[in-house]
Amino acid sequence: MSDVADDRVYYVISDLHIGGDEQLEEIEFREELLGFLRRLEDTDENAELVINGDAFGLWEFTTVDGIEKFDTLEETYPTLFEQFRRTGTNVQITLIPGNHDHELAAYDEYVERFGEYNVDLVQDESISRRVGTQAIHFEHGHQQDPNNQIDDWGNPHATPLGYFYNTLITSRAGQLSDRGKYNWLRDVQTVTPTERMPIWLFSKYFYREMNPLIRYSLVPFLLLFNVSAVLAVLAALDLTGVWSMPVTQASEFLGQFGWTGTAIWSLFVVNVAVTGLLLLVGVPLYFLRRDVRKTISRFGVFETALTVDTETPYEEAAREVFAEQPETTVFCYGHTHRPSIREVDGGLLVNTGTWLKRLHRRDGIIGLLPPVFYPSYQLTAVRIASESEGVSVEYQTITKPSPAAEELTLTERLLTIGREPDFAVPDRHVVETETQER
């Protein structure tokens, strides 16, 4: 247990993911982060800033190794490191490693180098801090994730599954991103869960990279696919002589509008023909795909999914910590990028979220248009303090405008009107003093 004074206030942030190859080096929340650090530089509180893992994207550096990555960070972000130095003269700054920056635990030189900027690097998997008569457990959270769990803590050659994804895919995206019509590929690190990456790539290709003439020629077909599927069935009924009334009435109705009606009818005919073909091919393919999936499942080829449970493992870890350390009533972690507070066995399970851009999938309302991934920021810092009634946990929001106007095409913005994400920051919670007697 840390001997830090009981009246200390803790500010907690995590998952900044600063750094990486080429385009990944840009900090899109740079001014907001500097402003937050300046505020702590001027605070009169007895405060400590805990950066709870993944402050840096060291996995995403593929051209330098070891302590050389610190040199790169220092050269790339001199203003940020100088602000660390100034803020650290007023409040204690504690940094613990996550999975993306696990190398911070692997090289002792990092401790000394960060110390030059008043940042206390603790190379442990977790730390504990006293707050009033209670205590807080801090860990990044990747140790509860089988895809990113590091069994040999501090080993510079530790390579869980997530390591390969980020060194082979995320870093490569940073190297190629500026070749697109818009610098969007670097956002691959914000796509969660990982399985969404293929559909995200297709979405950005369709709305950003596809030749406009091809895209706009496809839009009517894709928008009218649902209608055309129904018409294809009706056309089949008409051709077989089972039921001709719907086709006959539709033809007569559109015939009243001259060439406009003829054009609309022609569009429907083309859509119905293509849709009918897709339906004929799609039905057997559906059953084939279903049978293949069942066979794969029987053999257990894909037993491990990339997506992991983002709640249960952390609840179980919190229960274990609360049981072994009765004075601990707050379990604070990051990693999953989802700000949340949940009550667990009389204590609080607190996720600090991320400062990275977040992408919210918005599926098309009609037709087969690809989903839109709506970008936004939800920058938060968790404040934990001892008060008269107990220990309070509340989120402080750092405002940053949505980049949707610059990053989404007109078509994407039209498809998401009224469907923008709603950011509900978790409410303030208090762990009452007597709760620790549970």
Image (tube, rainbow, N blue to C red):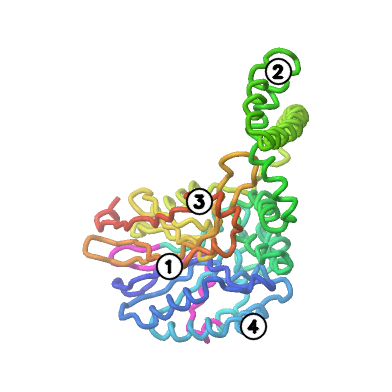
Q: CA distance from mark 1 to mark 2?
A: 58 Å
Name the residue tied to disc 3. 417
* Residue sitting nearer the eye, 210 or 314: 210
Question: Mark 3 near mark 2, Cβ–Cβ under 8 Å?
Answer: no
Local SS, label 1:
loop
Q: What x and y, as percent, mark residue 6?
A: 30, 71
Q: Quadrant of residue 12?
A: bottom left
Q: CA distance from mark 3 to mark 1?
A: 22 Å
- In this rendering, the label closer to the viewer, 4 or 3: 3
Given the image, on which type of amino acid does mark 1 rest?
Thr
Question: Mark 1 near mark 2, Cβ–Cβ under 8 Å?
Answer: no
Q: What x and y, as percent, mark residue 298?
A: 71, 32
Given the image, on which type of amino acid does mark 4 rest?
Asp
Q: What x and y, as percent, mark residue 292?
A: 75, 32
Residue 420 belongs to the span the image colors magenta: no
Name the residue tied to disc 1. 399
Local SS, label 3:
loop
Name the residue tied to disc 2. 237
Which label was assigned to residue 291?
none
Given the image, on which type of amino acid does mark 2 rest?
Leu
In this picture, is 226 found above or below 15?
Answer: above
Count of marks, rendered view: 4
- In this rendering, the label closer to the viewer, 4 or 1: 1
Near mark 1 (Cα within 10 A), the count class, few <14, some 14-19 or many ≥20, is few
Which residues are the magenta region? 114-136
Q: Earlier in the sequence, mark 4 or mark 3?
A: 4
Q: Quadrant of residue 271?
A: top right
Local SS, label 4:
helix
In this picture, is 295 found above or below 249?
Answer: below
Q: In the image, 384: left or right of 379?
A: left
Q: Quadrant of residue 212?
A: bottom right
- Quadrant in the picture for the N terminus: bottom left
